[in-house]
């Protein structure tokens, strides 16, 4: 409280609003809070809010806030706005709760600060501008997607209420537009309403209130995206993972249990454990440290125009180097471009190329993965049997304990190629089933923007 105490010390202000000089544009007015009595309200240009009553008290709301001089202070990080009330205004804020690795925001409101109508209006406007309008005089335009539908293209943020499938639909719409280079500059935020809700988990949005808080604060970070190519299909895009084996099966084979929420994944896992299967495939990869200069392009404005890069979407130099995707030999290093490595034929129970650490709220499949590091993490469990499957699925927790297994391997890659050979498994991208055919992926660093807690 030293800053606030220094700011509010000295002569008390009159009931009219006062502004500090231009080098310290802090709004100050007089207000009262019922039994707390009158005092000074202060709103800084950054959005910090404080109230210091004339007389010191040590009970009720103020004691709970932990300020023993009875001053009430909210840091700008917590404040999300304010609303007018009869005779004054109320401040809304979101403090953090929970352990450091899984904190959530909880919506709370202050007591009513009674002041003149004009001062209340100015305080509310100041708080809204600083706390959630990013200094603008009006709020941002938001497009809300509950089912995948198009807007009119004027939004500054996309607010998605849905699960991983809805996110995947949004991504296809972003990157298949003729103006995709402009579209990817618009950040999006997910309110988890599906079974997995991977993006919201990885952005620290562990509750819907936290997602709404992120929308107000508009703190964005870049997000890697992967291009997905198959010989007979139009190019698609992935924000989460490309899977083959147990993880893809337990997802798709429980589609009829969506009404159960995330518990359906546990039921699917038990079924896979009982079967104890492994699945053969041919696999080749391009390690992250061998990526080409072309794959390092980050600024959408620096990417080639559509007529050079194909009809739409970012270029894929690493995959283009492979030549004909339908015939390239994945079993022979000599047939692959420089830097590519053949892993030969694998017999695996789990194979997932992961773009985000959490594939759902409880499964941290790639603990060292980040939102934007230009890498996919290839998680491979290349042994079969019920015991291996049981141990793997039991250890896939929010700490990623499965990586302690000697049968589990992790490779950092920027592109890979997979030839599935066992029709009992499926190719699954972001929870969506793909044709049973060769699949190729290449990561595009920092291509999109997401809002984070």
Image (cartoon, helix red, strand yellow):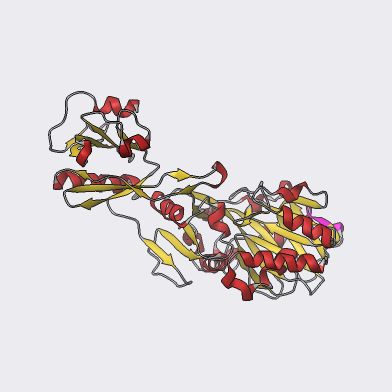
Q: Position of residue 346 (x, y in %)?
A: 85, 61
Inspect the magenta stretch and tell me whether residue 386 lies in it: no
Foreground residue among 182 and 409: 409
Q: Would residue 274 be found to the left or right of residue 433 on screen? A: right
Q: Would residue 34 be found to the left or right of residue 343 on screen? A: left
Q: Is residue 110 above or below residue 23?
A: below
Q: Is residue 300 above or below residue 111?
A: below
Q: Is residue 334 above or below residue 168?
A: above
Foreground residue among 10 and 112: 112
Q: Which quadrant of the rendered structure holds the N terminus?
A: top left
Instruction: Examine the image and state in which quarter residue 269 appears.
Output: bottom right
Q: Which residues are magenta?
A: 333-342
Q: Is residue 324 visible?
A: no
Q: Is residue 100 visible?
A: yes
Foreground residue among 127 and 283: 127
Farthest-out residue, front: 59
Q: Would residue 168 be found to the left or right of residue 25 on screen? A: right
Inspect the magenta stretch and tell me whether residue 338 lies in it: yes
Q: Position of residue 436 (x, y in %)?
A: 74, 74
Q: Would residue 24 be found to the left or right of residue 228 on screen? A: left
Q: Position of residue 294 (x, y in %)?
A: 65, 53
Foreground residue among 353 and 190: 190
Q: Position of residue 199 (x, y in %)?
A: 55, 57
């Amino acid at each position: 409280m030293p800053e606030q105490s220094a700011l509010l010390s000295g002569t008390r202000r009159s009931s009219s609003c006062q502004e500090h000089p231009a080098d310290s544009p802090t709004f100050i007015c007089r207000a009262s809070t019922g039994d707390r009595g009158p005092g000074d309200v202060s709103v800084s240009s950054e959005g910090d809010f404080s109230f210091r009553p004339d007389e010191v008290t040590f009970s009720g709301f103020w004691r709970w806030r932990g300020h023993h001089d009875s001053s009430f202070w909210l840091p700008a990080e917590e404040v999300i706005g304010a609303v007018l009330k009869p005779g004054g205004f109320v401040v809304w804020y979101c403090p953090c709760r929970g352990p450091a690795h899984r904190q959530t925001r909880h919506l709370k409101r202050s007591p009513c600060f009674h002041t003149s109508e004009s001062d209340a209006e100015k305080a509310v406007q100041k708080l809204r501008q600083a706390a959630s309008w990013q200094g603008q005089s009006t709020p941002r335009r938001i497009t809300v997607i509950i089912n995948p539908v198009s807007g009119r293209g004027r939004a500054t943020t996309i607010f998605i209420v849905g699960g991983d499938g809805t996110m995947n639909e949004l991504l296809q719409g972003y990157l298949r537009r003729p103006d995709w280079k402009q579209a990817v500059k618009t950040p999006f935020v997910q309110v988890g309403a599906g079974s997995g809700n991977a993006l919201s988990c990885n952005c620290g949005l562990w509750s819907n209130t936290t997602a709404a808080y992120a929308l107000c604060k508009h703190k964005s970070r870049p997000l890697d995206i992967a291009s997905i190519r198959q010989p007979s299909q139009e190019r698609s895009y992935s924000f989460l993972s490309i899977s083959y084996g147990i993880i893809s099966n337990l997802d798709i084979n429980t589609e009829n249990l969506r009404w159960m929420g995330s518990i359906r994944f546990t039921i699917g896992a038990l079924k896979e454990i009982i079967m104890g299967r492994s699945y053969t495939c041919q696999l080749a990869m391009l390690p992250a440290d061998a990526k080409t200069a072309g794959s390092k392009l980050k600024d959408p404005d620096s990417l080639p125009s559509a007529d050079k890069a194909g009809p739409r979407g970012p270029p894929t130099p690493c995959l283009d180097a492979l030549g004909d995707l339908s015939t390239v030999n994945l079993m022979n290093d000599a047939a692959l471009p420089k830097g590519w490595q053949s892993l030969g034929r694998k017999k695996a129970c789990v194979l997932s190329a992961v773009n985000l650490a959490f594939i759902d709220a409880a499964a941290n499949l790639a603990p060292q993965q980040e939102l934007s590091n230009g890498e996919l993490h290839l998680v491979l469990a290349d042994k079969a049997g019920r015991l291996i499957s049981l141990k793997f699925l039991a250890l896939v927790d929010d700490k990623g304990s499965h990586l302690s297994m000697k049968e589990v391997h992790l490779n950092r890659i920027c592109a890979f190629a997979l030839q599935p050979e066992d029709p009992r498994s499926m190719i699954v991208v972001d929870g969506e089933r793909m044709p049973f055919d060769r699949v190729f992926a290449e990561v595009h660093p920092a291509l999109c923007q997401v809002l984070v807690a």
